Amino acid sequence: MHEEDILRNAPSVLTQAQRRQFFADGFLTLENYVDAGRLLKLNAALDEMIEASRSLAESNGAYVLEAGHSAASPRLHRISNPQDLHPAVWDFFLDPLLTDLAADVVGPDVKFHHAKLNLKAPKGVERFQWHQDIVGWPHTDFSPVTFGIYLNGCSSDQGPLSLLPGSHRGPLHDIFNEAGDLIQGAAESLKGREAEIVAPTGGSGTLLILNCRIIHGSGLNTSDRARPLLLPVYSSADSFPYTPSRLPTPRMGEIVRGQPARFASFDASRCPLAPNDAKGPWSRKGVAREAY
């Protein structure tokens, strides 16, 4: 669904001014949006997933380890599709607290795509490089959004998610070269615009809505606290991925609000594609060095 069509529907959670701000800037911050009761359940689920990682010696399809990970001291960079590992996470993704919010920015019929949980271990050595999400999982239009939920809040020393406002209106940048190697095309576009970058922080339950085209990344977590950021992706029901998922989940494509689409929505803009044997951001082996 396209922006002008989305805005014709009455909002459920946001004000019309907030919706217009999201579409103008490419992101929106809602401080302390998720309440303490929901966060308690999510953090309990996270503790169980971290406990399960103790037996791992290398990354796999679900867990991306950081350097120094051990059974005695787990260090995780990312958990892929945490909703497939713990039912409390999927219950949260189905909660109207999220699905009604998604409807305000993608349209009344909402579809789930995938999710990640970026951990950022304390005193970490890993960062998330500058990128645009949609290049990793192209869709027939640009309605997909990512929610970034800080489970325990985020301060400036924890490597908060950083964004270039308005960059979603600009070009899409390749993340692979012709050899299939990961490159930093989006980073090149930031030169001379560093002063425009913003890095919203906030307390526990603060939620960021990210347009799928906005350039974003995050720095090192130099604090002594982990920085769990839960990242579900939703789209309008009439938006369809047209490449295989590199983070597959049986939940992909499930309608979480409203009705399935009878017709697809298309955007004429071209989106770069990754080669089938691309290396880098979706690697499932070894310890992470850099991540998309």
Image: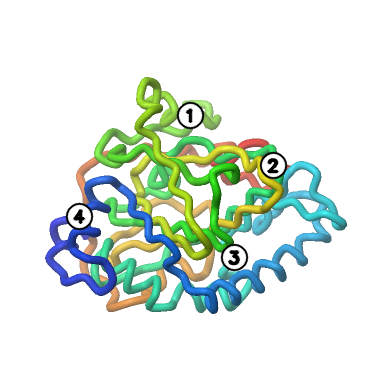
- Residue 248 lies left or right of residue 123; in this view the side is left
In terms of sequence position, does the residue under pointer 4 or pointer 3 come before the other? Answer: 4
Neighbour class for label 2 at 10 Å: few (<14), some, many (≥20)? Answer: many
In terms of sequence position, does the residue under pointer 3 or pointer 2 come before the other? Answer: 3
Residue type of the residue flagged with mark 4? Arg
Provide the secondary structure element on which disc 3 rests.
helix
Quadrant containing the N terminus in the rendered view: bottom left
In terms of sequence position, does the residue under pointer 4 or pointer 1 come before the other? Answer: 4
Provide the secondary structure element on which disc 1 rests.
loop
Q: Are marks 4 and 3 in contact (CB under 8 Å)?
A: no
Q: Position of residue 106 (x, y in %)?
A: 27, 62
- Residue 49 lies left or right of residue 113; in this view the side is right
Residue at the far right: name it: 72
User: Front-most of 94 and 16?
Assistant: 16
Q: Are marks 3 and 2 in contact (CB under 8 Å)?
A: no
Residue type of the residue flagged with mark 1? Gln
Residue denoted by label 4: 20
Front disc: 4 or 3: 4
Residue denoted by label 3: 82
Residue denoted by label 2: 124
Q: CA distance from mark 4 to mark 2?
A: 36 Å
Provide the secondary structure element on which disc 2 rests.
loop
Q: CA distance from mark 3 to mark 2?
A: 21 Å
Neighbour class for label 3 at 10 Å: few (<14), some, many (≥20)? Answer: many
Neighbour class for label 4 at 10 Å: few (<14), some, many (≥20)? Answer: some
Is residue 107 placed above or below 4 in the rendered structure? below
Q: Residue 184, labelled with which disc?
A: 1
